[in-house]
Image: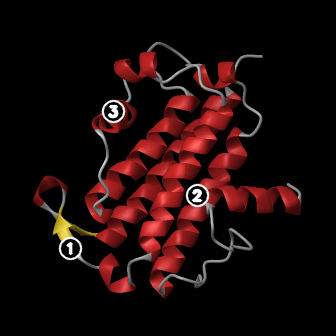
Amino acid sequence: MAADEMQALLQEAAPGLSITSPFLLTTLPGFGPTLGHLAGIMTYARVTTLRDVRGLSTEQLDHRLDDQSNSIGMLLEHMACIEEAYQEMTLGLAFEEAALERRKIGTDLGPAAWEAIRGHDLAHYRGRLADVRRRTLAELARRDDDWLFEEVPFVLGQRANNYFMWFHVAEDELNHRGQIRLLRKRLPG
């Protein structure tokens, strides 16, 4: 990958931030040290996702290996929806009813998503991911590192802190990026 292409992916993955390399986890202007490292991890995950979907057509984004599998487009929408869910849970962002309905389909995937999440080109998914990430980074920049360690009730009667929750957003994206790599290798033709 050429250096100029990497810079374009960095700008898309971290809108508004001046990150020179996805491989440097360092402090970032406007962020506490730990929040800056977290933003760097999230940026690395996004750069690799964007790199792995370059050049895909709408048909390729909609392709499903079988009648029980998700498509690459569905996984991209899922990434955006999961990030929105954590924006609401941890950052207090509010969403309109239509966005909540879309998010339910995108987080759950399955039969409803097989019908609803299709027919979009790559620019649609990339724009959606960038819009969601822009909101995330703007809101994270408004918080300090202490916020990361605030604990809240989570799943299975356990507690979690904001740091874990945003680590989970990055981890979930990396997990699905692995699926995307597999699906891309199995595309017809």
Task: Look at label 3 and name its amino acid.
Answer: Ala
State how far apart marks 2 and 3 are (Cα).
28 Å
Q: Nearer the viewer, residue 67 or 18?
A: 18
Taking depth in this image into account, of 44 and 87 the one nearest to the observer is 87
Residue 106 vs residue 30: left or right? left
Q: Is residue 1 left or right of residue 97?
A: right
- How would you rate the neighbour count of disc 3 (Cα within 10 Å): few for under 14, some for 14-19, many for 20 or more? few
**Looking at the image, which residue is at 55% across and 47% down?**
129
Secondary element at image label 3: helix
Q: Which residue is mark 3?
A: 98
The Cα–Cα distance between marks 3 and 1, rounded to whole angstroms, is 30 Å
The mark nearer the N terminus, 2 or 3, is 2
Answer with the quarter of the image where residue 105 lies: top left
Q: Mark 1 or mark 3, which is nearer the start of the sequence?
A: 3
* Residue at which label 2 appears: 45
For numbered disc 2, what is the local secondary structure? Answer: helix
- Mark 2 Cα within 10 Å, few/some/many (few <14, many 20+)? many
Quick one: label 1, few (<14), some, or many (20+) residues within 10 Å? Answer: few
Q: Residue at x 58, y 19 (%)?
A: 119
Q: Nearer the viewer, mark 3 or mark 1?
A: 3
Q: Which mark is residue 151?
A: 1
The answer to which of 71 and 126 lies nearer the viewer is: 126
Whole-percent x and y of residue 54?
Answer: 74, 40
Residue type (three-letter) at the residue carrying disc 1 = Glu
Q: What is the number of the mark on residue 111?
A: none
Q: Measuring from the top left, give residue 1's x and y in whole percent.
A: 85, 54
Q: Position of residue 47 (x, y in %)?
A: 66, 56
**For the residues marked 1 and 2, what is the alpha-carbon distance in whole angstroms?**
25 Å
Most distant residue in the left direction: 157
Q: Amino acid at mark 2?
A: Ala
**Please, what secondary structure does the residue beneath circle 1 have?**
strand
Work out which residue is located at the far top of the displayed protein and give it.
67
